[in-house]
């Protein structure tokens, strides 16, 4: 030991502590630490607190959480309120209970009390005990910590009224976190009174002026919404920007969205994406979902479905329902990876479990196709039952489908018709299905005229299957008068949307034999369109016409190709045509 340090040590604990402070101020941290340790062991809580900070921050010694906690306990037990407050903070952030130390220099600083980005597992019971000691000892930071615990801790510890009192005391002492906590407490009162709002804004401003990221974010929200302060979109975005630059992930998301949308200034999609990405990487699931949308939909950024899938996955894993549904659709379409209906069903199942109606409908569609888990059909029927009984017309329609197909339980056509009729007042698909049940006589007596009327309603709403069903009734005169011209109009509309049956029907109508001008060339074009999409009957007729030269000079080789495809689908007539085509060559 330095001789001077030895003499100072003999002089007493207080002298040692003061000399240690002087040495520390001069950067002679190792000599200072030795004196602090001796003073602490002699009973000085101030010295014990200083030793703890040395170990916590790695000043002159390797960082040691265990040693820091030990020395803080020594100081706290002997009434050192700063040590008590710091212990409460460490327990609150999980640092004192086994979680890794991160950014140790920030612990105990003005920014860390309300740091919602902490990843440690908090020990609220220990934090509460130490915060209460510090608060009762007059520590403004301890009072703010206790207010936070009483507000955001487990239900067994929550006491909003007491929390507001501690926040008010902390704010009165000028603690930035006290101002912030008190502002949030006033906001929770949910009073329309101008005085309450003015006090809330005043305390929020004081906290923001000290640079607290959460306070800056709060001021952004208040300014954006015009609560207790004049609404100012541009100023709100500046608050968000300042908070974002200080690491507040909610503000990073808001600032990123502002840049993407150009609210409060000029749009900058690339800069906006980078801020949203920061928020997502910090664990904000909404930010991750927005990134998924940015890359999956038409935006100023180039589409990248693989990137979208990655962000949707991150958001869905964190419990974002919309992202789970979107991820299911990516797997269903196969745009980001291989087409995988089972994986799609998995994500639709996740979203459906939280009551997402769109995901439930998607899962029901897959269940009808036999895709997914064995009990998916049972669950979807139960969801739709509850939704239908609560007045949801879409759920009523889907319940009707389950009942009509026997999905998730026994088939019940009578009940299916009842739910289809109920939903038909507002759902085009239900109008079509109700017409279908009436046309087929399922669940009651057949009524072609009534079926035709409901098909017409659904067709007018643009439903392709309804357009085709109505057109067929207009062709054969079922349920009313024939009108081939109107049928052609409907078939054209459906064919334009890719309906193969409508394409074939147009070929047949143009081919002659109907109350409609025949046009063999047009008929051949429609037969070819349907044939190329795999329609066996169209392939057979197209092949036969090509073989016989019905629409041209004929093409035996192309005729053989189409007839072979139709025969491969089990069409006996195509097989006979193919045999007759091959007979001359064999002779």
Image (cartoon, grey):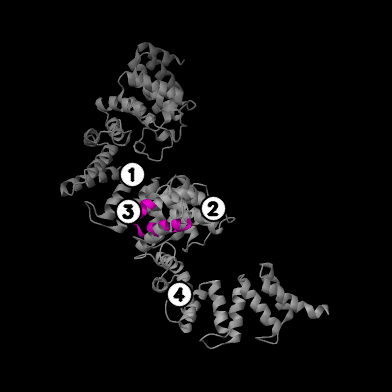
* Residue 27 appears in view: no
Labelled pair 2, 1 in contact (Cβ < 8 Å): no
Which residue is the site of mark 1?
214
Mark in front: 2 vs 1: 2
From the viewer's side, name the closer residue of 484 and 144: 484
**Mark 3 surroundings: few (<14), some (14-19) or many (≥20) residues within 10 A:** few
x 45%, y 71%: residue:
466
**Mark 1 surroundings: few (<14), some (14-19) or many (≥20) residues within 10 A:** many
Which quadrant of the structure image shows residue 535?
bottom right
Q: Earlier in the sequence, mark 4 or mark 3?
A: 3
In the rendered view, tell whether residue 461 sits above or below residue 211.
Answer: below
Find the magenta span and give its range: 385-405
Q: Earlier in the sequence, mark 4 or mark 1?
A: 1
Which residue is the site of mark 3?
390
Secondary element at image label 2: loop
Where is residue 193? Give x, y as percent: 16, 48
Which residue is the site of mark 4?
470
Disc 4 and disc 3: Cα gap in Å? Answer: 32 Å
Disc 2 and disc 4: Cα gap in Å? Answer: 31 Å
- Magenta-drawn stretch, dominant element (helix, strand or loop): helix
Labelled pair 4, 1 in contact (Cβ < 8 Å): no
| Tally of marks | 4
Quarter of the figure that contains the C terminus: bottom right
Q: Is residue 427 left or right of residue 471?
A: left
Disc 1 and disc 3: Cα gap in Å? Answer: 41 Å
Q: Is residue 380 magenta?
A: no
Disc 2 and disc 1: Cα gap in Å? Answer: 46 Å
Q: Earlier in the sequence, mark 1 or mark 3?
A: 1
Q: Is residue 204 left or right of residue 462?
A: left
Which residue is the site of mark 2?
371
In the rendered view, tell whether residue 244 sits above or below residue 491.
Answer: above
């Amino acid at each position: 030991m330095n001789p001077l340090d030895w003499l100072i040590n003999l002089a007493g604990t207080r002298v040692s502590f003061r000399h240690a402070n002087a040495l520390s101020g001069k950067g002679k941290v190792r000599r200072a630490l030795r004196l602090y340790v001796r003073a602490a062991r002699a009973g000085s809580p101030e010295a014990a607190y200083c030793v703890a900070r040395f170990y916590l921050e790695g000043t002159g010694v390797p960082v040691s959480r265990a040693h820091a906690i030990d020395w803080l306990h020594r100081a706290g037990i002997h009434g050192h309120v700063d040590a008590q407050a710091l212990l409460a903070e460490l327990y609150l952030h999980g640092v004192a209970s086994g979680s890794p130390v991160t950014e140790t220099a920030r612990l105990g600083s003005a920014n860390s009390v309300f740091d919602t980005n902490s990843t440690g597992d908090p020990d609220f019971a220990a934090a509460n005990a130490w915060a209460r000691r510090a608060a009762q000892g007059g520590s403004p930071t301890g009072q703010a910590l206790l207010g936070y615990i009483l507000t955001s801790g487990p239900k067994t510890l929550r006491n909003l009224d007491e929390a507001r009192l501690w926040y008010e005391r902390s704010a009165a002492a000028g603690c930035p976190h006290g101002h912030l906590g008190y502002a949030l407490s006033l906001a929770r009162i949910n009073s329309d009174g101008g005085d309450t709002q003015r006090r809330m804004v005043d305390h929020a401003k004081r906290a923001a002026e000290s640079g607290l990221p959460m306070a800056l974010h709060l001021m952004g929200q208040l300014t954006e919404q015009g609560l207790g302060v004049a609404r100012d979109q541009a100023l709100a975005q500046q608050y968000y920007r300042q908070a974002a630059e200080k690491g507040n992930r909610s503000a990073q998301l808001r600032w990123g969205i502002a840049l993407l949308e150009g609210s409060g200034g000029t749009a900058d999609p690339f800069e906006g994406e980078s801020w949203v990405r920061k928020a997502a990487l910090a664990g904000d699931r909404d930010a991750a979902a927005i990134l998924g949308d940015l890359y999956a939909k038409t935006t100023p950024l180039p589409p990248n479905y693989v990137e979208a899938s990655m962000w949707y996955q991150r958001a869905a894993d964190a419990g974002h329902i919309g992202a789970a549904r979107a991820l299911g659709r990516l797997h269903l379409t196969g745009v980001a990876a291989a087409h995988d209906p089972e994986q799609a069903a998995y994500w639709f199942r996740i979203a459906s479990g939280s009551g997402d109606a769109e995901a439930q409908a998607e899962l029901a569609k897959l269940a009808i196709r036999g895709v997914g888990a064995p009990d998916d059909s049972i669950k979807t029927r139960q969801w739709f039952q509850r939704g239908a009984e609560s007045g949801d017309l879409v759920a009523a329609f889907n319940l009707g489908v389950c009942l009509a197909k026997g999905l998730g339980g026994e088939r019940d056509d009578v009940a299916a018709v009842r739910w289809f009729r109920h939903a038909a007042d507002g759902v085009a698909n239900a109008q079509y299905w109700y017409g279908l049940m009436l046309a087929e006589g399922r669940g009651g007596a057949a009524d072609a005229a009534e079926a035709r009327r409901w098909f017409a309603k659904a067709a007018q709403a643009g439903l392709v299957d309804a357009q085709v069903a109505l057109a067929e009734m207009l062709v054969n005169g079922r349920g009313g008068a024939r009108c081939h011209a109107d049928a052609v109009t409907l078939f054209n509309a459906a064919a334009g949307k890719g309906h193969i049956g409508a394409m074939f029907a147009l070929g047949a109508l143009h081919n002659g034999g109907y109350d409609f001008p025949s046009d063999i060339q047009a008929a051949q074009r429609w037969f070819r369109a349907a044939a190329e999409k795999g329609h066996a009957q169209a392939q057979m007729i197209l092949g036969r016409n090509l073989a016989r030269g019905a629409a041209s000079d004929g093409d035996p080789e192309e005729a053989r190709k189409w007839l072979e495809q139709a025969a491969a689908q089990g069409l006996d007539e195509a097989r006979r045509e193919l045999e007759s085509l091959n007979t001359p060559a064999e002779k």
